[in-house]
Image (tube, rainbow, N blue to C red):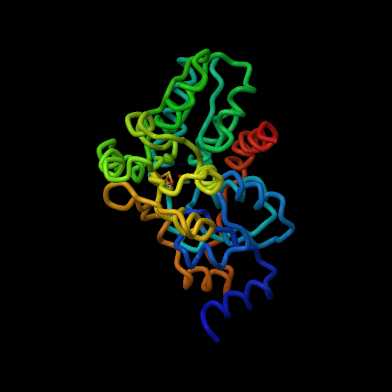
Amino acid sequence: MSLLENIIKLKKEKKALILAHYYQRPEVQDIADYVGDSYYLSKIAKDSPEQIIVFCGVRFMAESAKILSPEKTILLPALDAGCPMADMADGEALLELKKEHPNAAVVCYINSTAEVKAHCDVSVTSSNAVKILRKLDKDEIIFLPDKNLGSYLAEQMPDKKFILWPGFCITHRKVNPSHILDIKRIKPEALALAHPECEKEVRDISDFIGSTSEIIEYATNNSSRDFIIVTEQGVLHELKKRNPSKNFYTPGSTMTCVNMKKTTLEDVYECLLDLSNSIEVDEETRVGALNSLVNMHNYAR
Ligand code: 13P
Ligand code: SF4
């Protein structure tokens, strides 16, 4: 039996669900029951009846699923797949910042640790952040850890005062405006679609800003033929599947998140075989962090 057949057989035997983020390797996306952006996958993990979930992504995704569904077994196939940006914020420093801004709402990007979420009022993803923040009745917002998503949100809501944490995504930081302008010189009709984790200078010359799934939807529904994809290259797999006759260009050297690419089919097979790599969150932290994720799902509805 091939590796693929073995995974499918084990998945059936164990009644497991496989989820994959759009940044995962193409072959991992192809064996998943659901592929999507951070918010979509969080919703599926929370609402699905399966008690075993193989989360092909990075730690904060699997951790968030465990926080929302402690009774489920959440497996992270590559246990060392973290998110460097999530690790740029820590609970203790956040508590100090909260003391300086006692009236601010505290909002974290879902790309944060359980410890940080435990000190926040609500979590957001790039696809629901604007909707959620507009519903908050506070004029002052502490946003962490991504200063780029934070400054993008501040631009959308000039009536609110944002206090931004200085975190950033090392993958999206690699792009600079000249990479996009170089492609536009050769392909002037090409539309640049960028993730809000990109720096402001990159966002400012892009034609559309959105989450991974919003970028895929935009390119699919737009009549243009040429697109510059300014986010992690994993999204190209779904983009090409849905749009075989369109052209997708990547800025500079290809944008790759090494952590997202750690998960292999072998890892998926091995963790399904013996239900290894189960994510645990200590109960006190989990209960503290639960509120911010429950609020995200309620506000985003
Ligand atoms: P989205 O899939 O929500 O756009 O997030 C991108 C990301 O960086 C996940 O780590
Ligand atoms: Fe973290 Fe950036 Fe990788 Fe997303 S792409 S997991 S934000 S390092």
Considering depth in this image, is 172 or 42 the residue closer to the camera?
172
Q: Position of residue 15 (x, y in %)?
A: 70, 69
**Residue shown at 38% from the left, 37% from the top:** 198
Determine the image quadrant of residue 85: top left
Considering depth in this image, is 35 or 109 the residue closer to the camera?
35
**Residue shown at 31% from the left, 46% from the top:** 251
Asked whether, in this view, residue 50 is left or right of residue 184, the answer is right
Q: Position of residue 3 (x, y in %)?
A: 51, 79
Determine the image quadrant of residue 97: top left
Q: Is residue 219 above or below residue 126?
A: below
Q: Position of residue 108 (x, y in %)?
A: 52, 32
Considering depth in this image, is 99 or 301 the residue closer to the camera?
301
Kindly give the residue lying farthest to the bottom in the view shown: 1
For the image, the number of numbered tags is 0
Q: Position of residue 284 (x, y in %)?
A: 60, 40
Considering depth in this image, is 20 or 81 the residue closer to the camera?
20
Q: Quadrant of the C terminus?
A: top right
Asked whether, in this view, residue 48 is left or right of residue 146, the answer is right
Q: Quadrant of the N terminus?
A: bottom right
**Residue shown at 60% from the left, 50% from the top:** 41
